[in-house]
Amino acid sequence: MKNQVVLITGALTGIGRAAAFAFARKGARVVVSGRREEAGYALAHELKKIGAEAEYIHADVRNEEEVKNLVAKMITRFGKLDIAVNNAATEGQVGPITDQTAESVAATFDTNVVGVLLSMKHEILAMQANGGNNKGNIINISSTYGHKGAAFASVYVAAKHAVEGITKSAALELASSGIRVNCVSPGPTDTGMLTRFTGTDENKAILVEGVPLARLGRSEEVADGIVFIASDEARFITGHSLNVDGGHSAV
């Protein structure tokens, strides 16, 4: 993985941030992206302090022109794109389906689904210019809720089901081109999103009851799964959803 160029959207906190450090420690050159410039530049500085070549580039994945510019700036800086991690996401409006509106659904899907599609479009175009048989890897961050249901999270669940469908379809479309496309699907993971999603420590504890390993996952553990699925050790894996969930999806 040394000197490979990695792009991570939604990289400023949680799983995206952990993935940036995991790739950097493997010797990759890392572009982190998100909407908060101060946090983005601070993260790039931290990555450089551990010896990585790293850059922050601002982008809102809901805006195609910004996504296009993100990839173009990355190519200008590093010359290629080898690995893309599409992590930008929102939990959306949590609550019963009867409380959802067209606006709340669109707000969730714009980031979690449209953002993934737009990112993939421009990442694929960049990877197609790479030489060799292995042109690149795309990893979309889904959730165990991408293949399960969850009460009071209908829109988020629907969006993650869409991400998994997009991933499988793109993997089939691109299999002969040398670009692999997979998902990593975290179970309950101790992130800011989970804290917002659950609202209380009591609700977090209820989630833990559904995890056979009897604890929340850590962002660094999900990052390890992301690095694996992007690596040569996973070179015969495409169209797959890798659960990093403590057994949550087996229940």
Image: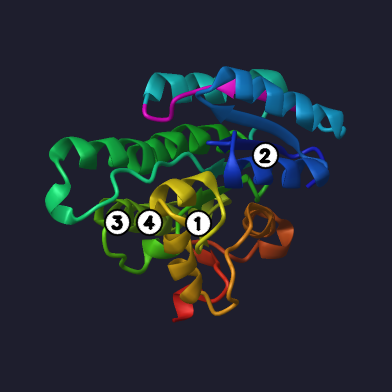
Label 3 vs 4, first from the N-terminus: 3
The image position of residue 237, as x and y in percent, is 58, 65
| CA gap, disc 1 and disc 4 | 10 Å
Label 4 vs 2, first from the N-terminus: 2
* Disc 3 target residue: 153
Q: Quadrant of the C terminus?
A: bottom left
* Disc 4 target residue: 169
Q: Amino acid at mark 3?
A: Ala
| CA gap, disc 3 and disc 1 | 33 Å
Label 3 vs 2, first from the N-terminus: 2
Q: Is residue 114 left or right of residue 1?
A: left
What residue is drawn where x is 67% and y is 59%?
221
Q: Amino acid at mark 4?
A: Ser
Q: Residues within 10 Å of mark 3 (few under 14, many from 20)?
A: some
The image position of residue 143, as x and y in percent, is 45, 59
SS class, disc 3: loop
Asked which quadrant contains residue 23, the reply is top right
Q: Amino acid at mark 1?
A: Ala
User: Residue 120 or 20: which is nearer the viewer?
Assistant: 20
Q: Looking at the image, do the residues carrying marks 2 and 1 touch, with CB atoms under 8 Å apart?
A: no
* Disc 1 target residue: 175
SS class, disc 1: helix
Q: Looking at the image, do the residues carrying marks 4 and 2 touch, with CB atoms under 8 Å apart?
A: no
109 part of magenta stretch: no
Q: Residues within 10 Å of mark 1 (few under 14, many from 20)?
A: few
Residue numbers of the magenta segment:
54-62
Label 1 vs 4, first from the N-terminus: 4
Above or below, comparing residue 241 to residue 59 in the picture: below
* Disc 2 target residue: 131
